[in-house]
Amino acid sequence: MIKDEASFWTIAKTWLKYNTDKFPKSFLIEAKVIRRLSISFPYSELSEKEERLLLRAKNSRVISTHSDIGRVGTDCDASVISGGGFIFLKNIRPRNKTFYVIDIEKFIEHRENSTKKSITEDEVKSIAYLTANHV
């Protein structure tokens, strides 16, 4: 699962570099994948911490400090993120180039109105902030 998310994030980062105009100036992202051979994404795969940070980024601000401890160092000492919180979700199946960007509040609203423990790809399509394709 972690390997699939890492592979997806590499692709999503490249796509994002050319599509930042589709988003607020500052936002937070959590990349998630629908597991292989599965047809839905369990709501529980988004942790409480991830959800809380995405909501705070959308409705207030997230302040992250970056430690200079160690030899590598950091780009800067802190970052302040506000304006949006999104989940990037992709179904990890062969040759699938489509992924979905979901606003955190839409995701939570759908979860709270659902009687199921997971969200299907068709349901994701209906609440997606945008649908993206990568090469």
Image (cartoon, grey):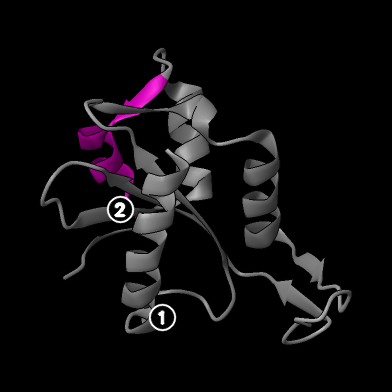
Residue at left offset 71%, top offset 55%: 56
Whole-percent x, y for residue 82 in the image: 67, 69
Q: Quadrant of residue 101?
A: bottom left
Residue at the spot 51% in from the left edge and 76% down from the top edge = 24
- Vertical placement of residue 26 versus 9, above or below: below
Relative to residue 10, is residue 117 depicted above or below? above
Tell me if residue 48 comes above or below residue 131 in the rendering: above
Dot 1 amino acid type: Thr
- Residue 4 in percent (x, y) is at 37, 46
In this view, the residue farthest toward the front is: 71
Secondary structure found at label 1: helix
Instruction: Identify the mark nearer the N-term, 1 or 2.
Output: 1
Q: Quadrant of the C terminus?
A: bottom left
Q: What residue appears at the point 26 percent right and 54 percent down from the top-left corner?
A: 99
Could you classify mark 1 by the number of other residues whose Cα lies within 10 Å: few (under 14), some (14-19), or many (20 or more)?
few
Labels 1 & 2 near each other (Cβ < 8 A): no
Seen from the viewer's position, the closer of residues 122 and 8 is 8
Q: Is residue 123 magenta?
A: yes
Left or right: residue 12 versus residue 85 is left
User: Which residue is painted at 32% across and 50% down in the image?
Assistant: 128
Q: Which residues are magenta?
A: 118-129
Camera-side residue of 3 and 17: 3
The span from disc 1 to disc 2 (Cα, nearest Å) is 15 Å
Q: Position of residue 79 (x, y in %)?
A: 75, 77
Residue for badge 1:
20
Identify the amino acid type marked 2.
Answer: Tyr
* Residue topped by disc 2: 100
Secondary structure of the residue carrying tag 2 is strand
